Structure formats: structure tokens, C-alpha cells
Amino acid sequence: MSGRLEDAVNIGPALAHDLRAVGIGDLEALRAAGAQAAWVRLHSAGRHDCLSSLLALEGAVRGVSWMELSPADRDAVAGAARAALAGGTAPVASA
């Protein structure tokens, strides 16, 4: 698999651009950071900080469409992000 962000499932040109703007330049860097940490960076920068982009990132890290994430996984990912933002703590690593 290519390391280009645009070649990952769920990541289009706009999200790839925003990821690069916050220091995540390729798919390997996204996987190393984890979906939660990448999303918190986007949120902090005011870029692509909605739940849809968080789920897209989680799916990209796992190599699946975000729609393939189970409802329980979606809830866990969203809950961890809410907790990280509310508590100002480091985000939880991708499941």
C-alpha cells in the first residue's frame, strides 16, 4: 500500500491537505500518531474537526471504510475524543 494519504480509504484531498498542515505527511505518520491524536491536532487547528472526520481517520488507520466500524467502535472512538477534549488529556490510541 502506498504511503500517500490520498491513497488511504476515507481520506480525500481536503483531509489530506489538512493532515499535512498539522504535521502528518503520510499514511505511516497517521498510523504512528493514531486517529485520535491526529483528530485532536486537526481540532486544535480548527480544521476538519467533526465526528465524520474522526471516524474517517479511524477507518483509514484500520484500512476500512468508516461505515464498516461497528456501532460500538464508533461510540468508543467518539467517547474517547470527547473525554480527551473535555479533560485536556492526551488522546487515547486507536483501537
Image (cartoon, grey):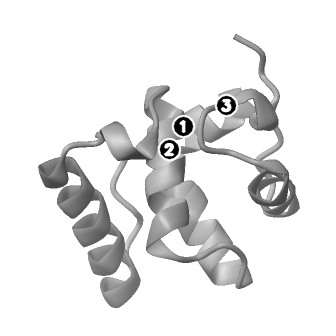
Labels 2, 3: front one: 3
Which residue occupies 69% across, 10% down?
1
Disc 1 is placed on an element classified as: helix
Which residue occupies 29% across, 42% down?
69
- Is residue 44 visible to us here? yes
Which residue occupies 70% across, 31% down?
27
Real-space Cα distance between discs 3 and 1?
6 Å
Disc 3 is placed on an element classified as: loop
Left or right for 78, reference 21: left
Q: Position of residue 51 (x, y in %)?
A: 44, 71
- Is residue 94 visible to us here? no
What amino acid type should be assigned to the residue bearing mark 1? Ala
- Give 19 or 68, whichever is nearer the viewer: 68
Q: Position of residue 8 (x, y in %)?
A: 67, 31
Real-space Cα distance between discs 2 and 3?
14 Å
Sequence-earlier tag: 1 or 2: 2
Residue highlighted by disc 3: 8
Residue highlighted by disc 2: 34
Residue highlighted by disc 1: 60
Q: Quadrant of residue 33?
A: top right
What amino acid type should be assigned to the residue bearing mark 3? Ala
Q: Position of residue 88 (x, y in %)?
A: 40, 83
Which residue occupies 54% across, 69% down?
40
Q: Is residue 34 above or below residue 7?
A: below
Labels 1, 2: front one: 1
Q: Are marks 1 and 2 in contact (CB under 8 Å)?
A: no
Name, please, the residue furthest toward the bottom.
86
What amino acid type should be assigned to the residue bearing mark 2? Gly
Q: Is residue 90 above or below residue 57?
A: below
Q: Is residue 30 above or below residue 82?
A: above
Disc 2 is placed on an element classified as: loop
